Amino acid sequence: MPCIRNMTEADLDAVLAIEQACFPRGWSRNLFLAELASERSSCVVAEQDGRVVGYLCLTVLLDEAEILNVAVDPARQRGGIGNRLLQYACDEALRRGAVVLRLEVRATSSSAIALYQRWGFRQTGLRKGYYEDRIDAVLMDKPLIKEDVDAV
Ligand SMILES: CC(C)(COP(=O)(O)OP(=O)(O)OC[C@H]1O[C@@H](n2cnc3c(N)ncnc32)[C@H](O)[C@@H]1OP(=O)(O)O)[C@@H](O)C(=O)NCCC(=O)NCCS
């Protein structure tokens, strides 16, 4: 099982390699550095056998939390790492007082949408042509109820 720990600047080479493998126009190093410096944000990596195999960035503003970014090394996908990261996001959002967890996802990211549905997220909206190549953004959220957080 991977361990989840706080992301540091020393992780960014490995994080950026996964980011570039997963997204056509992913986050830059500076964007990750800004999230690491933000008091509102919590960024974690999943580490397995001494290697960074995934990560997640979460931000909390008052009682709303948002997953800003999540990805797993393509070579390690379908091994339960995404589930571990979502468990962290729900626990941390609840711990910091959020009552809802939101996110936006490319309509073409079927594995991510399947992951979010598995965790009880429901579609709340659609932004037409929001991403590069005019891909739609699907808006999803999940009420944070104590029982759900212990579900996986
Ligand atoms: C989405 C992502 C993070 C999932 O990570 P993962 O480690 O493969 O996920 P897991 O193995 O923990 O699977 C968790 C659940 O997601 C769903 N799922 C994941 N990949 C899936 C796929 N290819 N097809 C169908 N369901 C899938 C399943 O419900 C699975 O639950 P189960 O195996 O217990 O039934 C990973 O596919 C990824 O990095 N994708 C590219 C980046 C991305 O799209 N990020 C989201 C941006 S909003």
Image (cartoon, rainbow, N blue to C red):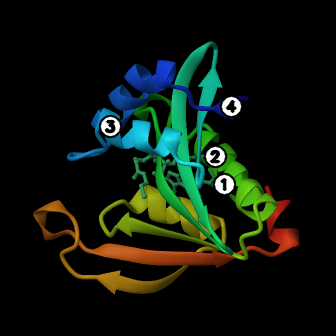
Q: Earlier in the sequence, mark 3 or mark 2?
A: 3
Amino acid of disc 2? Leu
| Residue tagged 4 | 5
Nearer to us: label 4 or label 3: 3
- SS at mark 1 in the image: helix
Frontmost residue, 95 versus 121: 95
Report whether the residue tagged 2 is closer than 8 Å to ligand 1: yes
Outermost residue, top side:
50
> How far apart are labels 2 and 1 at the CA level?
6 Å
Number of disc labels: 4
For residue 135, side relative to residue 104 (left or right): left
Q: Residue at x 57, y 31 (%)?
A: 7
Q: Is 28 above or below relative to 3?
A: below
Name which residue lies at 21% across and 47% down: 25
| Residue positioned 35% across, 37% down in the render | 19
Amino acid on which the number 1 mark rests in the picture? Ala
Q: Which mark is residue 89?
A: 1
